[in-house]
Image (tube, coloured by chain):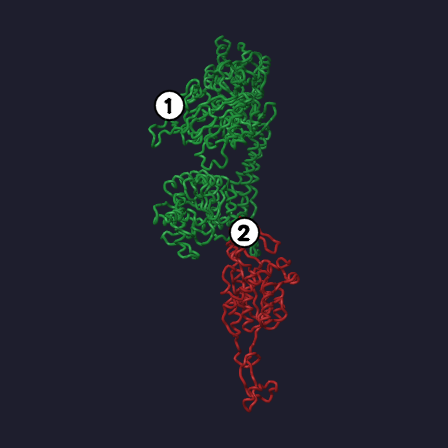
């Protein structure tokens, strides 16, 4: 049903050729299904505001007041008595959550064929979140891909497609911060360091945006299983680093890795955001649950 | 043995090896490449080892070894036998130049020349084979003289006489002409001509000997006496057994010198003999004069045929029809066996046989001639033909004119239940009998014979008698020809004579009376054998040079020593010719015995060098491959393969494949062994058998069905079969089974051996029960005959079949039945159409149907039926069992109940009275 054309492929930051795009599209149904499964693991209902307002659900009939327009009068109810009644619906405040997932080559990687790409796992988590939110009546936007948030079934399809198939650069996060008071979920590996991310997220702090940072990382990145003479390349290309005995630096590396995670957690706390870590060889449900609670919890 | 380098300068490069070692140490192995997204976290990290990992020690050693090997190979190393001719002293060369030196004579000559040339001393030459002319006193010659003498000497087509050479050396020694530092060299042909051991020890007792032996793979070949066969002749080539295979072409030459046939004879590795068959029609065979091996022309690889080669054409008159349904009871079988080595036989009706213009006719009793035929036979004999007759019931009842003696009607029966007399053995042959000298077969008892009426010339006409003096073989000339009568039959029913070896010998002697335009060899009584054509050293027949050679008339051509006095060739005595061939001697090709101490054997040429370059380069190439794999492994490139191997559990798989391959190598002999023990086991009790189709379900049902039938038989009848046996016709011996069930669901693929086995099985009275198991569906679909049955009947010769009828014996051999049901019913059952005419005692060899009988018979181990039946008739399973019992009874007892067919008629007749 969803076929990325050549245009979307070229527009995508990294799926720079058709082959990549098709490869991605082939995974789309599986990822979407996984997201849905994840989302349904969550039992929750639409949460009303317990007062009348703009909504679809019936709340109460009340006496018509003189300021009520004629069109507001419920004639069927009024015909049963001498008074005029107005039909009120419950106020349903839809909040908007903006989602962004890293799509750069370093994120689009896994250390082993049996493990999912970090990006795919992020897509699954975010899409599942989008499904859960939209089913709950909220609105969801994909940063860098959409101008306005979407809701409802049709919106879900669009959001899911954007999340799974398309990626946008982290620059778009700046513009996101200027768009009022949304909530935001940012999924990445955050390997650029807390400094850079602090700069990126400073605008959110100014705008009062809250949300969650989801760090997704590969087991190899934490464990550092390399030994012997090893040359390390970045998936993006460019720089390489050679070690005569890779096992010798494992300890130092692991210290740096956990330091980076602590820095990011620190940053999140400073921003008032939630920081969630997820390793791709563990199951997605716990991470999803805490993510959902951190986003939807205060909306209830 | 010494190691030499042809390009020793290349060894200088070995000096660079330390440099290489240092280089290898300095060069680290290629790094493992890894993608790693958190690369910036690795910035500025320091691993504590500044120097890179160098290649492991063993890898460095391996690479150094490869380099060393290559340098050594480039230096061209050779292993050459040490030059043994370093000692000073005159040479004494013993050179074999008998027939077996012919293939290697040029090399032997060259070698001797080289040895003479290498020494600056005088040399004495002793040749082991001489023509007697050049046997001057042995003396030391100058080098030039020795060379001339060597070049003048040639190979002789007879056996070298080494002891003669030793005698001459001894004489020289006695005459004090042998200096103490003489070096003895023996250039041998590599064969033991019977005296090699004595020669070796005699020579080594004089001094230290170096012996040069030609490489065995190029050694001499020999043709041993060809054996006539029905298609032509079979010849055997001999050689010294070596590990190399060798293919040798053999040509057959006719009397005009033209090539008639050419075959390739292949020696298997390690084999000392190889067989080949030259296929020649009879007419061509009689023109065959010579066999030769063009690739190795020598006296040993040539075979000259003498006059005895021509084989007479014998016509055996048959009564027509298929007389060989039971070959062992037919006289033709014994005649054919007895005549095959000595004659060409044709078998046909009288007129057809006469057309072939045979020189001998054999008339047995079943082929009683018509009056017209008698005239023709009479004309044949009067024109010079030889007629050999055998007695029999017809001749005993009424003798015709074509007999050598007058016969008494009725014949004589000895040893019967009502007779006083015991079977008679043969009397010794008298001196004027042509059979004189043959051992009279004491075991050849005669039970019946035809008797001759006494008359004045009876005595001279009798060639062989029984112990009581009655004639066994009589003969009389008639016209230009002769009639010979055996007073017994050619089949073993009247006497044991056809079973004895004497029969063949007597027939061979009898054949000598056949007229022939060729020289049929007869034992010449007088004169002497004179060499007519001599076989020269390169295997050509030529007029004998010098004085003619003679052999006494009683010379045994197979044990003669071949010498210059009687060389190989063709000898003539009056009209007879005999060939003296090297191959007619026994044990000619025999390897030299182990040398005694004091003799050094040098195989091949003295100058043989074993170049090691190729071997070294190959080894280094192999090591390079090892290095490559090791380098890949060190770089971590083989992890995937390793994982895959572990994951797929490939090691058991590899082992399994190896095991399978090994078992396939062993299997054929094991199968043959199995077949034999299986047959022995199967023969120990009556067993029903089924043919294994390879379809497990079908085979299991066959087994269960026959098991069920066996159980039913045990319960109801006195037949108590053992467990059923599955057989494969191309492996197992079928003759021990009286009934074989054959499920045919698709056209079977039969090997030629299987077809032959099944043919023989049917001919010898076996019964095949063929079941298509489909209720006739395939036959209906094919519109008539089942395609699988058609395929079988096109391969196995079966008599014509017909649908079974209500009166067939099969319906009453045990139970009276009218149906032949199995799992289904109503299918047509086919049996041989001519039940009484077949020689199998009126029993049909084939019962073919389609109703899946085994399914109805099948019982499991608890005695419960296995298969569900169609239940088209009442008590179908019971009826099927009854049919099965009838079938087994039919197979076991034959036509025993056939007379019951007539019971209705008999009852009717009784009723009339």
Name the image quarter holding residue B472.
Answer: top left
Disc 1 crowd, CA 10 A, few/some/many (<14, 14-19, 20+)? few
User: Residue B146 location, x and y as percent?
Assistant: 58, 14
Q: In the rendered view, does B296 fall on the left or right side of B720?
A: right
Q: Which of B301 and A188 is in front in this view?
A: B301
Q: Colour of chain B?
A: green
* Image location (x, y in percent) of residue B579: 53, 20
Q: How far apart are marks 2 and 1 (CA)?
A: 68 Å
Report the mark closest to the observer, 2 or 1: 1
Badge 2: chain ID: B
What color does chain A have in the rendering?
red
- A123 vs B733: above or below: below
Q: Which secondary structure, mark 2? A: loop
- Which quadrant of the structure image shows residue A204? bottom right
Q: Which residue lies furthest to the bottom in this view?
A: A82
Q: Residue furthest left?
A: B420
Task: Report if residue B601 is visible in the image.
Answer: no
As drawn, B843 above or below B217 = below
Q: Which mark is residue B467?
A: 1
| Residue B697, position as x, y percentages in the image | 45, 51
In this figure, which residue is indicated by the disc labeled 2? B783
Residue lying furthest top:
B175
Q: Nearer the viewer, residue A73 or B375?
A: B375
Chain assignment, label 1? B
Can you tell which quarter of the image residue B466 is in? top left
Nearer the N terminus, badge 2 or badge 1?
1
CB-based contact (under 8 Å), mark 2 and mark 1: no
């Amino acid at each position: 049903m969803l076929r990325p054309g050549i245009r979307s492929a070229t527009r995508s930051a990294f799926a720079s050729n058709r082959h990549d795009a098709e490869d991605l599209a082939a995974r789309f149904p599986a990822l979407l299904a996984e997201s849905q499964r994840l989302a349904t693991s969550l039992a929750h209902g639409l949460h009303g505001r317990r007062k009348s307002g703009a909504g679809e659900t019936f709340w109460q009939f009340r006496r018509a007041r003189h300021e009520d327009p004629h069109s507001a009068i419920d004639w069927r109810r009024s015909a049963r008595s001498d008074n005029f009644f107005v039909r009120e619906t419950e106020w349903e405040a839809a909040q908007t959550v903006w989602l962004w997932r890293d799509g750069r080559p370093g994120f689009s990687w896994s250390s082993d064929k049996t493990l999912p790409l970090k990006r795919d796992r992020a897509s699954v988590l975010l899409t599942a979140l989008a499904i859960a939110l939209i089913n709950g009546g909220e609105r969801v936007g994909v940063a860098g891909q959409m101008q306005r948030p979407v809701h409802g079934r049709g919106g879900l399809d669009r959001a899911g497609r954007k999340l799974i198939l398309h990626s946008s650069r982290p620059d778009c996060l700046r513009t996101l911060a200027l768009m009022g008071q949304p909530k935001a979920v940012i999924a990445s590996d955050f390997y650029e360091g807390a400094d850079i991310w602090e700069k990126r997220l400073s605008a959110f702090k100014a705008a009062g945006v809250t949300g969650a940072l989801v760090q997704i990382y590969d087991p190899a990145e934490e464990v550092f299983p390399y030994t012997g003479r090893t040359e390390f390349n970045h998936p993006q290309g460019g720089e390489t680093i050679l070690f005569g005995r890779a096992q010798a630096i494992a300890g130092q590396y692991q210290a740096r890795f956990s330091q980076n995670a602590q820095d990011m957690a620190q940053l999140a706390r400073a921003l008032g955001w939630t920081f969630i870590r997820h390793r791709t060889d563990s199951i997605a449900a716990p991470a999803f649950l805490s993510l959902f609670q951190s986003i939807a919890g205060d909306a209830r | 043995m010494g190691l030499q380098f042809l390009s020793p300068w290349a060894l200088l490069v070995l000096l660079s090896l330390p440099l290489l070692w240092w280089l290898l140490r300095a060069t680290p192995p290629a790094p493992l490449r890894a993608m790693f997204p958190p690369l910036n976290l690795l910035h500025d990290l320091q691993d504590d080892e500044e120097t890179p990992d160098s290649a492991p020690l063993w890898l460095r050693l391996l690479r150094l070894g490869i380099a060393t090997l290559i340098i050594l190979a480039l230096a061209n190393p050779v292993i050459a036998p040490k030059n043994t001719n370093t000692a000073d002293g005159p040479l004494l060369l013993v050179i074999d130049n008998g027939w077996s030196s012919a293939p290697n004579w040029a090399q032997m000559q060259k070698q001797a020349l080289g040895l003479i040339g290498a020494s600056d001393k005088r040399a004495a030459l002793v040749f082991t084979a001489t023509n007697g002319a050049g046997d001057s006193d042995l003396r030391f010659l100058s080098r030039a003289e020795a060379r001339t003498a060597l070049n003048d000497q040639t190979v002789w087509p007879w056996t070298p006489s080494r002891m003669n050479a030793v005698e001459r050396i001894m004489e020289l020694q006695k005459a004090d002409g042998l200096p103490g530092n003489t070096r003895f060299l023996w250039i041998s042909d590599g064969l033991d001509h019977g005296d090699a051991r004595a020669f070796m020890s005699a020579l080594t007792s004089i001094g230290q000997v170096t012996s040069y032996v030609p490489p065995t793979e190029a050694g001499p070949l020999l043709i041993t006496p060809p054996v006539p066969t029905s298609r032509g002749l079979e010849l055997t080539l001999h050689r010294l057994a070596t590990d190399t295979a060798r293919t040798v072409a053999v040509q057959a030459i006719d009397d005009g010198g033209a090539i008639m046939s050419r075959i390739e004879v292949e020696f298997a590795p390690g084999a000392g003999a190889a067989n080949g068959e030259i296929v020649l029609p009879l007419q061509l065979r009689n023109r065959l004069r010579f066999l030769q091996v063009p690739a190795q022309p020598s006296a040993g690889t040539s075979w000259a045929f003498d006059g005895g080669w021509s084989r007479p054409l014998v016509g055996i008159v048959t009564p027509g029809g298929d007389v060989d349904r039971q070959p062992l009871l037919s006289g033709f079988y014994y005649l054919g066996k007895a005549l095959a080595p000595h004659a060409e036989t044709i078998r046909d009706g009288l007129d057809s046989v006469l057309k072939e213009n045979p020189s001998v006719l054999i008339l047995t009793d079943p082929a009683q001639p018509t009056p017209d035929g008698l005239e023709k036979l009479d004309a044949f004999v009067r024109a010079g033909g030889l007629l050999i007759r055998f007695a029999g019931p017809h001749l005993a009842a009424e003798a015709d004119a074509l007999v050598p003696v007058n016969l008494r009607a009725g014949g004589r029966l000895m040893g019967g239940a009502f007779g006083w007399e015991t079977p008679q053995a043969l009397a010794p042959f008298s001196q004027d009998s042509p059979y004189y000298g043959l051992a009279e077969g004491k075991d050849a008892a005669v039970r019946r014979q035809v008797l001759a009426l006494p008359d004045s010339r009876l005595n001279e006409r009798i060639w062989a008698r029984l112990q009581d003096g009655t004639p066994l073989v009589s003969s009389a000339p008639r016209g230009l020809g002769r009639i010979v009568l055996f007073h017994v039959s050619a089949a073993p029913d009247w006497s044991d004579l056809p079973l004895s070896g004497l029969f063949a010998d007597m027939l061979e002697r009898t054949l000598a009376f056949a007229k022939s335009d060729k020289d049929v060899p007869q034992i010449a009584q007088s004169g002497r054998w004179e060499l007519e054509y001599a076989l020269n050293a390169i295997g050509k027949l030529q007029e004998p040079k010098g004085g003619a050679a003679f052999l006494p008339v009683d010379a045994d051509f197979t044990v003669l020593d071949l010498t210059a006095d009687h060389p190989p060739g063709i000898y003539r005595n009056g009209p007879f010719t005999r060939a003296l061939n090297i191959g007619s001697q026994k044990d000619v090709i025999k390897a030299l015995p182990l040398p005694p101490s004091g003799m050094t054997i040098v195989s091949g040429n003295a100058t043989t060098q074993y170049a090691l370059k190729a071997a070294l380069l190959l080894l280094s190439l192999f090591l390079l491959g090892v290095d490559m794999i090791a380098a890949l492994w060190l770089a971590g490139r083989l992890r995937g393969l390793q994982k895959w191997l572990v994951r797929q559990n490939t090691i058991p798989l590899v082992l399994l494949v190896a095991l399978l391959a090994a078992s396939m190598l062993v299997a054929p002999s094991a199968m043959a062994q199995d077949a034999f023990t299986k047959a022995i086991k199967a023969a120990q009790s009556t067993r029903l058998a089924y043919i294994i189709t390879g379809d497990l379900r079908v085979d299991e049902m066959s087994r269960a069905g026959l098991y069920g039938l066996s159980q039913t038989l045990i319960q109801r009848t006195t037949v108590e079969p053992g467990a059923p046996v599955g057989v494969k016709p191309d492996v197992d011996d079928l003759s021990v089974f009286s009934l074989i069930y054959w499920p045919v669901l698709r056209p079977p693929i039969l090997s030629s051996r299987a077809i032959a086995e099944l043919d023989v099985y049917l001919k010898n009275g076996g019964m095949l029960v063929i079941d298509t198991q489909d209720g006739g569906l395939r036959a209906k679909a094919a519109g008539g005959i089942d395609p699988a049955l058609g395929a079988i009947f096109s391969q196995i010769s079966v008599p014509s079949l017909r649908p079974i009828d209500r009166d067939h014996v099969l319906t009453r051999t045990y139970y009276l039945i009218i149906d032949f049901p199995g799992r289904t019913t109503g299918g047509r059952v086919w049996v041989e159409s001519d039940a009484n005419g077949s020689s199998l005692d009126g029993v049909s060899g084939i019962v073919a149907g389609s109703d899946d009988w085994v399914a109805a018979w099948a019982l499991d181990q608890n005695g419960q039926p296995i298969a569900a039946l169609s239940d088209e008739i009442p008590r179908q399973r019971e009826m099927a069992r009854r049919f099965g019992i009838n079938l087994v009874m039919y197979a076991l007892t034959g036509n025993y109940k056939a007379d019951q067919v007539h019971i209705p008629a008999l009852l009717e007749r009784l009723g009339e009275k």
